[in-house]
Image (cartoon, rainbow, N blue to C red):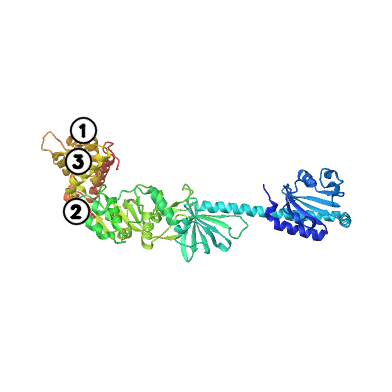
Amino acid sequence: MDFNLCSIQDIVQKYAQVIAQVSGVDVEVVDKKLYRVAGTGLYASGVNQDMSSEGYVYKHILNTGETRVIHNPGEDILCFNCPNRSHCQETIEISMPIKVDEEIIGIIGLVGSSTDQRDLILQNEKLYLEFVNQIAYFIAAKVSEQKEKESNLSIIAILNSVIDYMEQGVLIMGKDNIITRNNESAKKQLGISTLKGNTVKIIHTGDELNNTSEYKMIIDNKEVFIMGKVYPLGIRNDHYTSLIIFKNIKTVHSDLYEMTATLKTADAKNIIGSSEATKILKSNIRKVAGSNSTVLITGESGTGKEMVATAIWKESDRRAQKFVAVNCAAIPESLLESELFGYVKGAFSGADPKGRIGKFELANQGIIFLDEIGDMPIYLQAKLLRVLQERTITRIGSNQVIPIDVRVIAATNKDLKDMIERKKFREDLYYRLNVIPLNIKPLRERREDIEELTDYFIKRYSRLLNKSYSYIERSTMELLKSHMWRGNVRELENTVEFMVNMMESHGVLNDKTLPMDFFDDVSAEGAISNNPDTITPIKELELREIQKALSIFGETTEGKRKAAASLGIGLTTFYRRLEELSRKSNNFQNGNPILKMKNN
């Protein structure tokens, strides 16, 4: 390592003067290149001179590392080549190396130039050697200290350059938690224009998420939650005691949202359809969008409940915030709670050891969409109710209560009132959710929309599949418009995608492009054939009539009672048949590999 005596020349000169005053002889100090760094008496005028042409004793010490006492300068063997040998003014000389970690960085020379000085040194030679050795140690320590200081300053200079280019916020803390350095990202994430000089109070909340710790930071009378780490610097400098690398918790939320958000969104004006039911729905979306009240969207599977939810979001004053969707039926019951509320590191066995931020926290300031709310387990319904009442959440494994500002939109294709009667859904939660009810009519009850939707999907899939489209035959469109569409808009979209795939080069969609299952369903749901050779299965007739009764009386609990009475069967039997109808509908949407198209 390069230790330079010249870097502390003033200090070395002071030490040389002290030695000269105590010893009564002249003193000089040279560095390892035989450059005179300090001198007194005879050598005072020669400071900063090169001595390499005459320092023969010093050269020997640089090679051997041994202290040497020359009792007879000019006569000693080391003096034979010295040009001043014949007229040497020195009477005695003590030369001692200055070492740092066994590396020789210079030499101290005590030189007597009179008989009295020679006698004085000879009488106290041991004492002089111990004294000079101590001074050599002091000089070495000062050089080491200077070198460490220079090294630390270099590290700090590098650190300052690096942190300016970091996307994460960086604070360098000094004594008493005063900010001595920060980067621009720290200003942006904390929302404070001037950070340097502020005193920071930083409190660990106890939660560990994403391999980082959560802290509450109080600065300039502002309270901010951050995710990051605090690193002690270990530098003996009051200006550089610790380093904080962090992200504002809101920035963490935004990053996670950008990684997971894959929603297709629509404004109310972009919802396709001109039927009276669709016009009323669009109008209601605009009316309720500006509110913060909870919305409950009901409707059969495939009617577009998520599209209505995103339309409310896009029309609201929260449109610039996050829309977080959770399908309560798609997440295993054992994981749904942690998915909604998050958990901290080590919360339970089998969990991600890094911890996780929950969907409610992620949606803070925005909207959370709880799809298939009817599939939420009872025990979790109680926790959701508490969140809606108190507007706070607690991560699993944490004691920290987190306030949230989230608008909740829930959706279901189930009869929640019926589920309440069967103790499958909490009545108090139902009324908390059903503040603003929106019902989406099934496609068979708004047939005016079918042609517009078909045209839209034809254009979309023609473009995606790079197909040239000319027209759809009128008879084929009439078949589509008269279809029951148990799978609603989703089934219609899948059917059109199939048709475009099957379309010939002439670009005409006709009956031949319809999937075979389309005609199977028509025979089951259409008018009973007058052909005496055609037999319609009793099961198909029964399910068809149940569907007709529901269309007439509605799908409320009271409507189902009337439907059962009109069919002449008990309510329990009616529900059992309804379950069979539901299974058939699900199989129709999901079971056939031809119809199971990707949802682009």
- Of tags 3 and 2, the one toward the viewer is 2
Mark 3 in CB contact with mark 2 (< 8 angstroms): no
Residue at screen point 56% across, 57% down: 242
Name the residue that disc number 1 marks: 505
Is disc 3 placed on a helix, strand or loop?
Answer: helix
379 or 23: nearer the eye?
A: 23
**Residue 139 drawn at (x, y percent):** 73, 55
Name the residue that disc number 3 marks: 540
Q: Amino acid at mark 1?
A: Ser
439 or 332: nearer the eye?
A: 439
Q: Is residue 176 left or right of residue 348?
A: right
* Structural distance between the alpha carbons of marks 2 and 1: 37 Å
**Residue 45 drawn at (x, y percent):** 75, 56
* Structural distance between the alpha carbons of marks 1 and 3: 38 Å
Is disc 2 placed on a helix, strand or loop?
Answer: helix
Is disc 1 placed on a helix, strand or loop?
Answer: loop
- Of tags 2 and 1, the one toward the viewer is 1
Q: Amino acid at mark 3?
A: Glu
Q: Amino acid at mark 2?
A: Ala
Name the residue that disc number 2 marks: 277
Q: Is residue 435 above or below residue 414?
A: below
Q: Is residue 224 above or below residue 353?
A: below
* Structural distance between the alpha carbons of marks 3 and 2: 29 Å
Would you identify the image quadrant in which residue 428 lies? Answer: bottom left
- Of tags 1 and 3, the one toward the viewer is 1
Tag count: 3
* Neighbours of disc 2 within 10 Å: few (<14), some (14-19), many (20+): some
Q: Which mark is residue 299?
A: none
Q: If you read the primary sequence from the N terminus, does the residue marked by circle 3 or circle 2 appear first?
A: 2
**Residue 526 drawn at (x, y percent):** 15, 41
Q: Can you see residue 422?
A: no
Q: Is residue 495 left or right of residue 20?
A: left
